[in-house]
Amino acid sequence: MDCGRSVVVYPPAADGGRRVRVGDQFLGIAYGPLDVADFLRRAGVEDADEACARTSGPIEWRGGGPHAWRRPEER
């Protein structure tokens, strides 16, 4: 995957959702890797899918990787 812009998935919120940003654009709240892939496709990354979202190096996963969807104190 090459989106040409920085992709950031922020730490999980209290409800488990994670904010997703591509470049300077906030795309929404993701509740799993499938949501991240959907946001990336909407941002123009045509080849984005769930597997790509889980393993892609260009995605900066803050507060846990693609398997972290609850806050650390709730695990």
Image (tube, grey):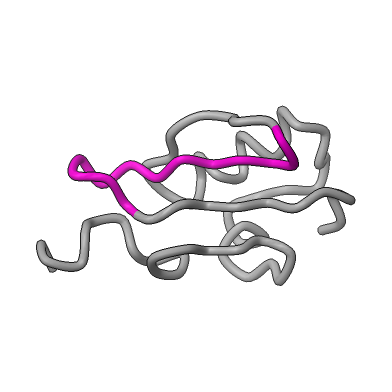
Query: Between residues 1 and 13, which one lies in front from this camera angle?
Result: 13
Compared to residue 59, the image places residue 57 above or below, namely below
Q: Is residue 22 left or right of residue 5?
A: left
Q: Position of residue 35 (x, y in %)?
A: 50, 39
Q: Which residues are magenta?
A: 12-24
Q: If the image is split into quadrants, where does the C terminus sit?
A: bottom left
Going 50% across and 29% down the picture, which residue do you hit?
A: 28
Q: If the image is split into quadrants, where does the N terminus sit?
A: bottom right
Q: Position of residue 29 (x, y in %)?
A: 43, 34
Magenta-colored segment: predominant secondary structure: loop
Going 82% across and 48% down the picture, which residue do you hit?
A: 5
Q: Is residue 65 left or right of residue 1?
A: left
Going 65% across and 61% down the picture, which residue do you hit?
A: 59
Q: Is residue 65 left or right of residue 58?
A: left
Q: Position of residue 74 (x, y in %)?
A: 10, 62
Whether 49 is among the magenta residues is: no
Kindly indicate the quadrant of the structure image that contains residue 15. Answer: top left
Q: Residue furthest left?
A: 74
Going 61% across and 63% down the picture, which residue do you hit?
A: 60
Query: Between residues 75 and 35, which one lies in front from this camera angle?
Result: 75
Query: Between residues 48 and 7, which one lies in front from this camera angle?
Result: 7
Whether 21 is among the magenta residues is: yes
Compared to residue 18, the image places residue 42 above or below, namely above
Q: Residue furthest front?
A: 24
Total labels: the figure holds 0
Q: Position of residue 71 (x, y in %)?
A: 21, 58
